[in-house]
Image: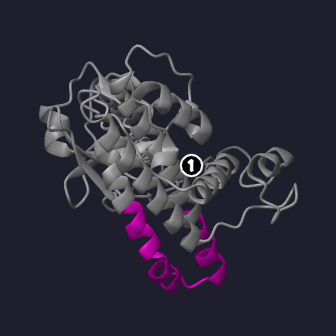
Amino acid sequence: MFEETIRALKKLGDEKSAVSISADDDNYFDRECPALECLAQFKVLMDDWRDKVRDEEVFCPFCGHAADAQKWWTQEQLSHVRDVALANIQGAIGGALRRDAQKFNLRQPKGGFISMSLRVDSRPQRVPIPYAAAAPMRLKITCIECGCRYAVVGAAYFCPSCGANAAELVFDLTVQGIRQSLEAVDAIKAAIPDADTAQNTCRLIIESALQNAVTAFQRNTEALYARVAPETKVRRNAFQNLAEGSDLWVAAIGQGYDKHLMPVELELLTTAFQQRHLLAHTQGVVDDDYIRKTGDTRYKSGQRLVIKRESVGEVLMLVEQLTLGIREEAKGKG
């Protein structure tokens, strides 16, 4: 009785359907790190994903995780593929069921004591919107080792194609991107109709700018130090601590951070680094440890940080000044 349906099911099992995933307007292709502790999204120029990135190994620009090229689908892309597959199945099976019902009904005797019929509920079928990548990411990078072009939001460090650490290049681009994001806050706020949403969005942009500035400094400094003192074993995240990082540079090149910044500027950066820690680990809620390490008496334990755009701009200026000073000192040492 269900010959058409059985035939449609068999055909679906035998067919291999391809689902098109498009790039954005700049021809960049969205990717997502498969590492559960990362899941960061980035983009790779479609031509370079095809011609430069190897099928055997792709690297996450943020965490350095490596996996084969089939592991990097974003959740949005996977949802799109599922939607298209479901729509295809619903269309094929629904049509076959309607044909089987029609055949069944035609075979029923007219005017009989018992009447039977089949009806297939044909509700409007949801047609998935073709996948389109989000707006081009702010930070576009060309790997100095292999030429692969990729894009990220925030601070990332590894080339997806060859895995090369681009911390120094990314630091310079990140500083530029952070300044642009801070300058755009007023325009973004004006463009969002709901006042609460606008306020929250601007707060997140400013807090993210602070975190990206500190993280970019850390990664850049780690890369510089590894070149200058490759035999020295450094604990993980040592350069998140300004005092510890300065001591490491004194041991390596004879100069610490105090050569490039005044004591009051180092104190301001110390507070900013501790604020980044709170934003990353306590959602910005102040604890006793923060107050003890910074002497920041503006807050009591349990309050939430208020990060101002002007303060992040000052932190960014000091981070850039310190980084350029270290970079100059490190020249010729590696």
Please identify the residue farthest to the top as the structure is shown. Answer: 231
Q: Quadrant of residue 330?
A: top left
Q: Say whether residue 87 is visible.
A: no
Q: Nearer the viewer, residue 234 or 123?
A: 234
Please report the residue visible at 43 percent of the width from the left and 68 percent of the height from the top: 181
Residue 187 in picture, x, y percent from top left? 45, 82
The number of callouts visible is 1
Q: Residue at x 57, y 30 (%)?
A: 238
- In the rendered image, residue 233 lying in the magenta stretch gets the answer no
Badge 1: few (under 14), some or many (20 or more) residues near its Cα, within 10 Å? few
Residue 257 versus residue 80: which sits nearer the camera? 257
Residue 97 is situated, as x and y percent measured from the top left of the image, at: 43, 43
Task: Give the extent of the magenta segment.
Answer: 177-205
Q: Position of residue 282 (x, y in %)?
A: 74, 47
**Is the C terminus in the top left, top right, bottom left or bottom right quadrant?**
top left
The residue sitting at 49% across, 16% down in the picture is 233
